[in-house]
Amino acid sequence: MLDATASQAKRVMTDRIWEDLLSEQDKQVITKAGYDREGASSWESRGMGENPMVLVIDMQRLIVGENVPILDAIEEYRTAMGDVAWDAIEHIDPFLDFAREQGLPVTYTRVVPSSYDDPDHPDLDIVDPVAPEAGDTVVDKSYASAFYGTDLLSRLVRGGHDSVVIVGNSTSGCVRATAVDAKQNGFSVVLPQECIFDRIEASHKIGLLDLWMKYAEVLETEAVKEWVETL
């Protein structure tokens, strides 16, 4: 695990993408209350663990859509994010290659909406650039959290994992729900911020801010990779 000094240095290096939303008072509250140094006061929200699993959240065709502007993508699927998703894929794809090279297990989730009678419908497929490879696991879910109604917790416990690295979408929805449940189940949570996205920019920034303050390490992807290399 990174020692406290190294971990703090990486936090300082990370570009906080939510800073432009904060008032001067907000910034002072974060600093004076110690959220920037310690996170939540009720539990250890700054831990990073030593044996992580990578969780790839809902990178499916009906959510990703075509690589076109988001306003065009939603003409095909109302849930699609178009270029917002594809911009993130440019970071997720190489990060997953790196994680596999480092021996980290990769688990995918697929949300199966109640409106789909066929769980094998092509709309629900994970898109090719970040599709599962041999040895990866795919977990189907019906709600936001990857933990609710699935065997994910059992898989983490059986594998001796103490942390999760979450990529995918959406920041304010399934990523947030999964991160909160992971923390509540005793796992450290690490979020490579370029590998996470949301259809609404404000929701994305505020979601990352809230997760960083209370539940997770939010770091630039390169900093996450440097941490993984120390394990």
Image (cartoon, helix red, strand yellow):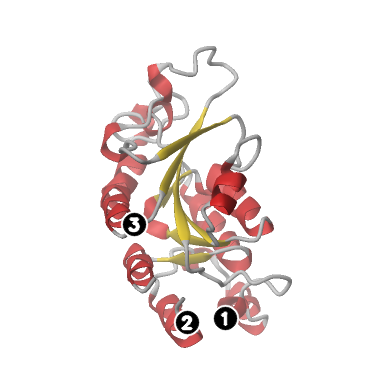
Residue designated by label 3: 103
Residue 129, position as x, y percentages in the image: 26, 38
Q: Residue furthest bottom?
A: 5
Mark 2 surroundings: few (<14), some (14-19) or many (≥20) residues within 10 A? some
Q: Tell me which residue sits at (31%, 38%) in the image.
A: 134
Hey, which quadrant is residue 186 in on the image? Answer: bottom right
Residue designated by label 2: 8
Residue 89, position as x, y percentages in the image: 31, 45
Hey, which quadrant is residue 143 in on the image? Answer: top right
Q: How many marks?
A: 3
Kindly identify the amino acid type of the residue bearing the numbered disc 3: Gly
For the residue labelled by badge 1, is the local secondary structure a helix, a strand or a loop?
helix
* Eye-nearest disc, 3 or 2: 3
Residue 137, position as x, y percentages in the image: 43, 39
Does residue 67 appear in this view?
no
**Label 2, label 1: how many angstroms apart (C-alpha)?**
7 Å
Mark 3 surroundings: few (<14), some (14-19) or many (≥20) residues within 10 A? few
Residue designated by label 1: 37
